Image (tube, rainbow, N blue to C red):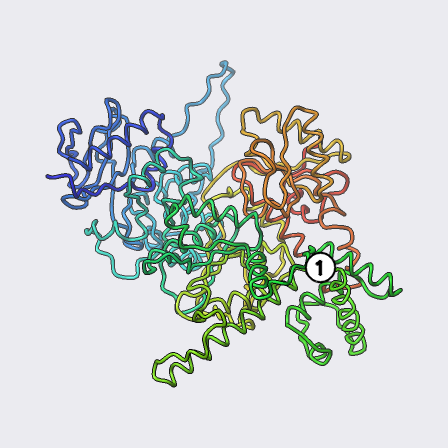
Amino acid sequence: MTGKNVTLRLLDKADREILKLPRPVKGAIYDFQHKFKTNPDSAGLRLKQLQGHDKLHSARVNDEYRALLLRLADDDWLIVSVKHRKDVYEHLDRLTYSVNRVTGGIEYVDLQVVQEEVLTPAAPRATAPTEPVPPAEPAAPRPLFAKWSEQQLTDLGVAPSLTPVIAALTTEDQLLGLVEYAPQLTGEVLLALYDGKEYDDVLEQVTAPVAAPEPVDPEDFQAAVERPATIVTTTDEALREALEGEDFGRWKVFLHPTQAKLVTRDYSGPARVGGGPGTGKTIVALHRVKHLVERLPAGRTKPVLLTTYNKNLAADLRSRLLALGGENLLSRVEISHVDQLALRTVREAEPGNRKRIVDESQAVREWRSLLDELGEDGWDAEFLHDEWTQVILGQAVTSRADYFRARRAGRGRTVSRSERAEIWQLAERFTQRLDRLEVQTWDQVAERAAQLETERARRIQAIDRQREEAGGLDNVHMADGSGGWLRYRYRHIVVDEAQDLRPAHWKMLRAMTAPERNDLFLVGDTHQRIYKNQVTLGSLGINIRGRSSKLSLSYRTTRQILRSALNVLGDETYDDLDGSSETLAGYRSVLSGAVPDLHRSGDWADEREAIAALIESWGQVPHEQIAIAVPTNQMASETAYTLAQHGIRALEIGPDGPRGDSGVHIGTMFRFKGLEYQRMIIAGVTDGLVPRASVQQRRTTDPARYRTEMQRARSLLFVAATRARDSLDVFWHGEPSPFLEELIRVRPPVAA
């Protein structure tokens, strides 16, 4: 056999197994794959078929280790495991591989390892002899999955070879042990059933999204390896990443079948992907960008826009896209946070507009100053600012009469016609005040950019209509003033953290790309909305009906942390960006870890000392993998000061990310959106701070606004909690936040 066209693939489960091997062995595997692809029949590789198997072979990696490979075709091989040589040739009958009849993917299971690691009990610890006591007859434990038949389990996609093992499971520890070795769908199905999901719900939420669209031939392994359900990699670079990288870098190589389908799907218009924290929405967005770029005609332009709601996240997207596809990919993509994009659009059209931009808190202060100067004490500055941004700017209201007709859905407090007249007059005075100060808000910039781009889109559409009427000929008089032809700015737009964009942002983005196939691709989760920007996309010209999908498997957060985070959300109802409600039903994790710890302190100083002691107890955990989220900037500074007294370096997270290279990351909960850490601490989760006391005061004065702000406060705590990969610790002093009520009920706190 010649080796020049040999394909060698690495199965996902084998990659996880290899990550645990010593570094020299990983290097040997990398060398092995080069030699194998050059000439599999090389004498040094000792390739041979294993007894009793028609497809399974072994090959020498080094003196101690062997690769197990499935031969899919003459020149197509799949690494399914790497074992020590002494473990390869025993129990060959316990090595099973098959094509899953539901997903059509290749699955490999070592039943001997499963038996030893999952069902074989550990030897009891030796103790001193005592007077024998006749043992009570123990009640036989009930199997966890006794209520489901073998046929039902296999119909859900469970690997048939594992059904005898599943029938013997009686404890959660055994189940979690099996999940580590089982094919991915088997683990997801079993955990969903164990968590109390009904059979039909599991079929719909877990199995159906990964089912093969066509009938599966269980004997055709070569067809099976090409399906999304067979998660593999083939390129040298990807294999190196899998061998040398940590789990956190696997996103560049492996996609879950559900993710892969969303990345490559051909959409007839705008599409949206939702899902809880850690489900890989951003990963899907990045791979979607790569997929779109690979289908572009050759050129030097940047017809794909990747955008998100702040500068920090945009910088992260840039670095991750570079890691995914290198400079070639980056050269065809415009990456910009949405406010920067709006500002650039305005300044291109109005080069003389150099007004300074103020943020929301500064704008609210200007409202307060205006009210003080006018002697107005009947209006709340924050309410007026929200009314101005969400209703007047948000709906591009330009006259008093239009404001009287404007919809105020979701604004809570009802205002009379006379009150609308007062608000309009105050809003006019406010905009005049900003003009005098030569400042503008980001909301104003976004709305102006939306107007400019909408007008540009109208001109393009007028040109297209005239071209059609002229039989395809261009009219030079319709050209852009610059002398070039008007074109849409982008061919494709991908939006990350879509739930936090303003209505004006959506109007601008809609106008920046032609309404065609695969024009807009949005990812986000309204449960993580931490700003006030609630929108209905359909009303803004972005119709996602029938093109919405949801990811439900968390790759970051353990089951234990996930349960606690979901408790924080309570029974709140969240929208789906299109006028309907959305839930996290089916949101799950196959990862397992420690239950979050709750810590009660007497006061804020004691709380900070307890946090420092906890970090010291963690020993060798890299400090940059530890984060502390707090309610206010002042609390962040005070925590950093306390840690410094204990010799622990801290880095405060600002608008542009951490201010340094190494140290514990500290910041307000807002700063942690899109980040993740091995160990997460949330501090100051005290009543009056989470949520703020001012929110509680609105309970009777403005019930609708109270509900909205309580929901945002819950979402903020939910976001902070789900940044954790391995452990979560929650601290408070005085009375705990009401959001912790359920957590405290099921897990009493530890006193500092």
Indicate left or right for 523 with 168 as reference: right
Residue 173 rendering spot, x and y as whole percentages: 46, 36
The residue tagged 1 is 439
**327 or 232: nearer the viewer:** 327
Picture quadrant where residue 320 is located: top left
For the question of whether residue 646 can be seen, the reply is: yes
Residue at x-position 50% and y-position 52%: 587
Q: Tell me the crowding category of disc 1: few under 14, some 14 to 19, or many 20 or more residues within 10 angstroms, Cα based.
A: some
Q: Residue 558's x, y, as percent?
A: 51, 42
Judging depth in this view, the residue of 725 and 628 nearest the camera is 628
Residue, far bottom? 469
Q: Position of residue 577 (x, y in %)?
A: 55, 64
- Residue 427 position, x and y percent, is 76, 69
Locate the N terminus by quadrant.
top left
Residue 585 in view here: no
Q: Residue at x 32, y 47 (%)?
A: 231
In depth, the one of 221 and 77 nearer the eye is 77
Judging from the image, what secondary structure is the residue with disc 1 in? strand
Is 556 situated left or right of 670 in this image? left
Which residue occupies 71% across, 32% down?
Answer: 608
Q: Three-letter amino acid code at disc 1? A: Val
Residue ID at (52%, 65%): 509
